[in-house]
Image (cartoon, helix red, strand yellow):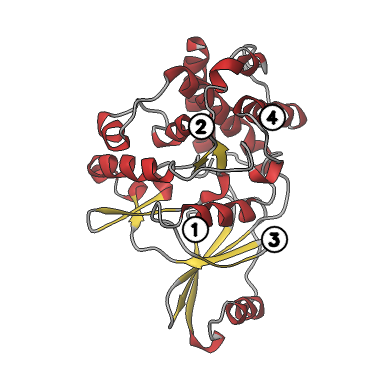
Amino acid sequence: MSGASGRRPQPRPLDPGYLASLLSRAGRDPAALITVTELADGTYNTVHLVKHADGDLVLKIAPTGPGLTHEQNLIQTEATFYQAALGKAPVPEVVLSGNDFLLMTALPGVTIHSIPSERAQYRRELGAIVASLHEVTGTDGFGYPQRGLKDSWSKAFLAMFDDVLYDAARYDVALPAKVSRQLVTDRTALLDSVRVPRLIHFDLWDGNILVDDGRVTGLIDGERAFWGDPVAEFVSLTLFSDIDADLITGYGADIDRERLSLYRVYLYLIMLIEGTPRGYTGPDHAGLIKLVERHLAKELATL
């Protein structure tokens, strides 16, 4: 989950010659480069704002080092997300991508996270944008593209959950006794009521939503995307909070609370585990862990 305190997994420095090569391949004159600025907000990739005479770009470079099982080829997943969502939601346009980089157009605005006092005014519009995003459907199956798609949502989500349990074991992260794959297997029929794989961003916390001049202008950091249940989107949209009426009004449909609780458990487990391979330490991280544990216990009590 983006936004946690700590350090990025071994960020990679940007070589000027490498950038010039990427610009040339993208059809942009390297001589027209104005400035390059590293953006410090990211917690996973190394991100640079590339100001160019032909239009500003954002360059993401994948990190090296250990991570969670599903954290592989995320740059490619992010490119796939933007290409699928383009025209349905305000997302960057992919200019050039590869196994470990993504060059895309820069969107206007600042994150809602940076202006929390104005957050509420965007919720109805955001709900409508997310509804439009969820009109994008897949044809090849459910799950994370980089982990292989499944022919049912219950199979896909069980595989996603199993990956997290495996990561907890290999990084020696203790989980509550109630956390087991039975949470998922007991709800196979409920999960299989989801029959159409829809495009899910799954990281729409306030730091990944751009706003400008009173409008929502961008959904960014689509690397955690998968094909699945639209209810899962509301985990990050309502991180550590209740679902608000404006969001639901804009979305135009109510949300199944049992599935939401299950997906919240999944994300909270990721947030508990990811800090170990990333090397998160310090009082801010300790405070975050206590917050996650408290909300995890609350959701487990409802299941």
Q: CA distance from mark 2 to mark 4?
A: 15 Å
Q: Which residue is mark 2?
A: 229
Q: Where is residue 33 shown, x and y percent of the image? A: 50, 83
Q: Which residue is mark 1?
A: 40
Q: Of all residues shown, which one is farthest toward the bottom?
A: 31
Q: In this image, 100 relative to 52: left or right?
A: right
Mark in front: 3 vs 1 = 3
Q: Secondary structure at mark 4?
A: helix
Q: Quadrant of residue 119?
A: top left
Label 3 CA crowd tier, 10 Å (few <14, some 14–19, many 20+):
few
Q: Identify the disc placed on residue 159.
A: 4
Q: In this image, 176 relative to 57: left or right?
A: right
Q: Quadrant of residue 187?
A: top right
Q: In this image, 215 relative to 140: left or right?
A: left
143 above or below 223? above
| Type of the residue with mark 4 | Ala
Q: Which residue is mark 3?
A: 99
Upstream in sequence: badge 3 or badge 1: 1
Upstream in sequence: badge 1 or badge 2: 1
Q: Residue at x 39, y 52 (%)?
A: 89
Q: CA distance from mark 3 to mark 1?
A: 22 Å
Upstream in sequence: badge 2 or badge 4: 4
Mark in front: 1 vs 2 = 2
| Type of the residue with mark 1 | Ala
Q: Where is residue 177 shown, x and y percent of the image? A: 65, 12
Question: Where is the N terminus found, in terms of image quarters?
Answer: top right
Q: CA distance from mark 4 to mark 3?
A: 24 Å
Mark in front: 3 vs 2 = 2
Q: Residue at x 48, y 64 (%)?
A: 93
